[in-house]
Structure formats: structure tokens, C-alpha cells
Image (cartoon, grey):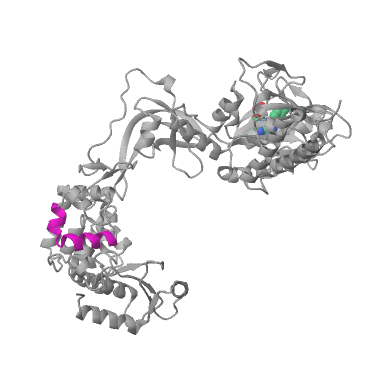
Amino acid sequence: MTQSPGLKDAQQRVQALREQIDYHNHRYYVLDDPLLPDAEYDRLLQQLAALERQFPQLLTADSPTQRVGAQPLKEFGEIRHQLPMLSLDNAFTEQDVSDFDRRVRERLGLTADDEQVEYAAEPKLDGLAVSLLYEGGRLLRGATRGDGSIGEDITQNVRTIGCIPLRLRGNTFPAVLEVRGEVYMTREGFARLNQQQQQHGDKLFANPRNAAAGSLRQLDPQVTASRPLMFCSYGVGVVEGKYLPTRHSDWLGALRSWGLRVSEQAQVVHGVRGCLQFYHALGAARDGLAYQIDGAVYKVNELALQQQLGFVARAPRWAIAHKYPAQEELTEVLDIEWQVGRTGTLTPVARLAPVSVGGVTVSNATLHNIDEVLRKDVRVGDTVIVRRAGDVIPEVVSVIKERRPAKVLSVKLPVVCPVCGSEVLRVDGESAIRCNAGLFCPAQRKEAIRHFASRRALDIEGLGEKLIDQLVDEGLVQHVDDLYQLDIEQLAVLQRMGEKSAQNLIEALGHSKQTTLARFLYSLGIREVGEATARTLAEHFGTLQAIIEASEDELLQVPDIGPVSASYIAAFFAEPHNRQVISKLRKAGVSWPEEASAPRASLPLSGKTFVLTGTLQSLTRDQARERLQALGAKVAGSVSAKTDYVVAGSDAGTKLAKAQQLGIAVLDEAGLLSMLDNAAAHPPQ
Ligand code: IVH
């Protein structure tokens, strides 16, 4: 046979590319230490695919381009396991573990107290068992465990799993090697998959294990290829070869050296103490792992001893799974209620028939938000999976639809706040439902007062969080206007509050009454109304009454106010409860100079943007900002091409450097003061 020109070169190039790709694949999937950016890796694959198209005679089944490509199957074939795939007995308590160890020692005749058994301890991954058969280092076949004797032929599917090598690395592997391990999905992969499923209107998976099982048992390998599956090896089945390891832990090392993924947590430990230490350390790390585990597995490490121990029924005598308490249980939804948080967000909470999850009784679980309730379609009367992990609040994971009784109604969305009866608002595009009565609602009371009193709002000195708690808890203050009804006698009897501090607080309350419209607006704690928006509103409308009366459309005319802020502002002032509090505040004497609005453009510094940096001597930065803003200037936080002036006090840092770099005018303190004076004296033409 004559070789076509270039074939020889192509052959070498194909060979080199495959080695390169295998190497990078291994770094990425097995060592978690990729060297190449994904795009570069893809380019290598494309080069190889192009060569294989040009020279089809060079194509082999173990080429990295051949992970996907097989046609969908009608059904899976059967595979008989030459050595049965066993399962494990479970231990639930420390006593169970020590009983297991005692049985092992008795059978091995290691009865003296100081004769400890060496165990290989590993995490018990929560996925499904798979057998991979390699011959001559090539992946020949993949099978599920099935009933332990006969499994399904999932060769085409396992080939699509990136971390399963199509060819083993090196040359020390046995001629025939059956690798056993777990196919699983990381939590992140699971979340991503469910997100996609939802976007496509497809069925959601209840947990990563189900998602892994569902993804692996696909007749179309293209589907499996699109799912984020992983494989971790934990042992071997049939092996034919020389110089084989004699300890389980050495097998794991060998598997790793041949390019397979092996648990990083696996350890050699001694005796029951070692096992339990491993169990507790792994348990503490459990919630932080990238994947779910449901226990630890202890295996007698010496293979000769394993042989001696043998197995009973379907499980070996030389290994045991020490389970962690379950994190998920089934229970029934008795009711769905809405809780109001301190900022007014309504959170749906499922009241559950009490169930013990991981040793703790759970009778409430969060449903997060309205979108989640609708997505999961949870209804009163449903049987649901609840999950509790670590310190996280228990949550409803999913509904077992098959168990839904006839005629259950879908959840009714709240129209009024369950705490204060005010109307609730759901802004388009947001998944939160909120109570509008920020100033009135008892659930939001403390937060509303804290914000009202804060420095940039009404600046009530001395009214901190602890004091607010006391005032509300003692029933002295319900709404912000009640603050102005307090007297010294009431305050002086509070804990940690003497006559002097009571006096000071009353004075501070008195001072706070003289304010500006912008500060007052900000102090109301309307969602989306920060200081800047409050100022814009004040300037645009001039009076509070005008803002209260403004329609949503009128609000939208104001520069920088978008549809979301407009609807929050309109809803806030439409709520009679809020208006009532505002009018009481005004009656108590809260006031500001209310002038006809002076449109921004006519102020002397309108259109100019300032950035303040460093320390000023004669005024604080807040004061400088307020004076600049009063003259129409904008004060920004960072220097950009849009900045007109940077005001640099002492110790100015990077902002000053940036201004110099951009050629922006820099003012020192004297320069700023003279500009302020000038601008105030000479309005622009
Ligand atoms: S050893 C004879 N090791 O648990 C030994 N199994 O309940 C058989 N599993 O079917 C398995 N992590 O799917 C072993 N480190 C681990 C494991 C593990 C998870 C699964 C496996 C097996 C089941 C037994």
C-alpha cells in the first residue's frame, strides 16, 4: 500500500495532538489544575478533528474527539459482572463502628487491645456505582451496577464524561483492569443543570444524585455529554496483570497515577479511633465540599486480610459505610404563611408536619420567595422533601407530585401585609413581594427608626440600635413620630440611661426637627430612594406635597428616576398609613425651608462634577459635599473623564494621582472655599 503524501506527517501530528489533549484533559479533570484556557483546549481539539476528517484512516475509538458521536440507543444492552458489584453494610452509630471493628479483629485473630487494624477511610459519595473495563489501557466498556450481577451497558455514555480517561496514562497498568467508582454531580453542576431545565420548561431534578442517575441513563449520549457528570474511583473489580498493589490505599494511588480521579479525602487510619476521627473531620468539612456525601467508608486496607474476611450475602465483611444523619426527609405541608422581614420583604414559609432531619425536629421551612413557590408549585397538603444542611435554615426542596391529594389549591398570593394589613407591592421583574407601609408596619418598626435617626437622615445623635430596641420593646415608640413625644422621665428609667443622656437625647431630637426636604425624604426609608434620589426629588418638586401628589408618570419625568423607583415612591405615598405618620411628624414640628423649586440648571455650579479626596481643615467632607450640592454641583465618588474638579485636602491619594494623569483641574482647600464663595455671590448668567 502506498501512503498518500502527507499521511506520515499527519500521523505524527495526530499522535502529538492526542497526547497533548489527553495531558490537558487530565490536568483539568483529574488534577483540578488546568494549564490552558478553555478556548485554547478547544482549538487543539478542532485541529485534531480537522486532521481526522482529512485522514479518516487515522481515526480511532480512543481519540479524544470520539467522546460524543455515538447514535442514540433503542435500549441498553445487558452486562454480566464477572465479579459481583457488592454493596455496603451501614453503621449509624459509633457503637456500630466499634462492633464492626471488633468482628473484623475477632475473625483475623487480632484480639489484643494494642492490635489495631489499618483501614482505608474514604468519603461515601452520593451518586451511582459504575464499572469501567480497560483492556490494554483502552476504555472498552462501562456498566451500571444494576442488581449487582447484571448491569446496563452505558459505554457510550461514560465515554462522554470528561474525567474518565479513554486511555490510561503511563505503561504500568494491568492488561485487564476493571475500575469501580461513583458517577456523581457537583452541587454547582446540579444547580446549573436545574436552572437550564427550568429555562427550557423541563422537569427539575430533586437532588444531585437523581440528576446524575437521570443523566447517565440516557439513551442518547449527546444528552449525557451535555450534563456535568464526574467520576471518582474507589476500587477495582477484575484485574489481570503483574506486580499489583497489595493494599487498598496503594490501589487508589495506582489508579490516580493511571489518570483516574480518586478522592482527595481518602486516608489511611488505625483502629476505631482513627475511623471516628476521620468521620468527624469529614463531617465538619461536609457542607463545604463541592459534592454531596452521605457517609464515610472504612475498608480493611490489606487485600490479604480482605480475602480472609470474605463477604456475606451482598456485602463484604471487610468494609462498612458509616452514615451521616440524613439531610433530607419527607413530610407534609400543613400551611403556607408569609413572614415580613425588617425591610418589608414577605417571605413564604411552609408550616410542616414535624419531622426529624439529621437529629433536629423541623416544623418550618423557607420557600425563599414567590418565584420559588411558583416554580416548585408547593401547595398546602403536598408531600415535600425538606432539607437541612449545617446551620442553614431548612428549605423545601421539591414536591412529590405523585403524592398530591386530589383538589389541592395552588398558593394564594398575599394582597395585604399579614402583619399590618397595608397593601403589598410586587415590582415587575423582582421576585420579592413587599409591604409598602415602611413607616407603620410593626415588622419594620426598628429598621424604620434606625434609618430615620441615622446620620444622613435626621441625624438624631445618641439614638443607636440598642436604645431603639429598648424603646420599641418597652412600648414607648411604635412609629417614628412617637420619638418626638418622649420625655426625660420616660427615658431616664430605661436601662443604661441616666438623666444626663436622657437630656441629651431630648436635645438631639429637638435639633433634628430642623432639616431639609432632601434629608426628610431620605429618612422615610422608601425603597430605592437613597440620598441622591431624595435630593433630585426635592429639587425637582420643591415641596413635599408636590411629591406626595405626583403620579407615577410624573415621577418618571424626573431625571435619574426609573420605573422601579417610581413605582416604589408612588406606592409609598399612596399608603394611608405612611401619610398618617408623615403628618404626625410635621405636627410634632419636623420642618424644612420649603421654597419653590429652583431648577438645577440655574444654580451656579450646575453641570459641574466634583470629587473630594484627602482631609480638609475648615470643614468636613460631608459639609463640603452639601455646600457644593446646594450650589447645583454633582459630587462623585471616583475620578473619571467626566470629572471637572478634584478637591484635594491633605494626604490625598490615588484620586489625586488619577486627576493629574487625566489632566483634571485640582483645587486645594483655599481654592474650593473661594470657588464656593464666588459661586454663591455670582450666579451664572
Ligand atoms: S466500596 C465492596 N467505596 O456506596 C465495596 N462504595 O452502599 C463496594 N459508594 O454501591 C463499594 N462511595 O455506589 C465504596 N468510597 C466508596 C463509596 C462507595 C460511594 C457507593 C457505591 C456502592 C454503595 C454501597
User: Is residue 255 in sight in this rendering?
Assistant: no
Q: Is 452 above or below relative to 249?
A: below
Answer whether residue 632 is magenta in the image. no
Residue drawn at 37 percent across, 29 percent down: 378
Quadrant of the rendered image containing residue 145: top right
Left or right of 16, for residue 381:
left
Total numbered circles: 0
Image point 20% across, 79% down: which residue? 682
Given residues 177 and 199, the one toward you in this image is 199
Residue 78 at x, y = what percent?
Answer: 68, 15
Q: In this orientation, does residue 193 appear? A: yes
Q: Residue furthest left?
A: 587
Instruction: Give coordinates of residue 349: x percent, y percent.
Output: 35, 37
Our reading of the magenta stretch's main secondary structure is helix
Q: Quadrant of the C terminus?
A: bottom left
Q: Nearer the viewer, residue 313 or 219?
A: 219
Task: Determine the image quadrant of residue 346.
Answer: top left
Left or right of residue 495: residue 74: right
Q: Position of residue 640 (x, y in %)?
A: 41, 66
User: Which residue is outermost to the right?
Assistant: 242
Please name whichever residue, 62 or 364, is drawn nearer the observer in this view of the structure: 62
Residue 542 painted magenta: yes
- Which quadrant, please, contains the N terminus? top right
Q: Quadrant of ligand 1?
A: top right
Residue 169 placement, left or right of 677: right
Q: Decide: is 228 above or below 221.
A: below
Q: Which residues are magenta?
A: 532-549
x, y (%) of residue 288? Answer: 56, 45
Q: Which residue is located at x 47 percent, y 35 percent?
A: 195
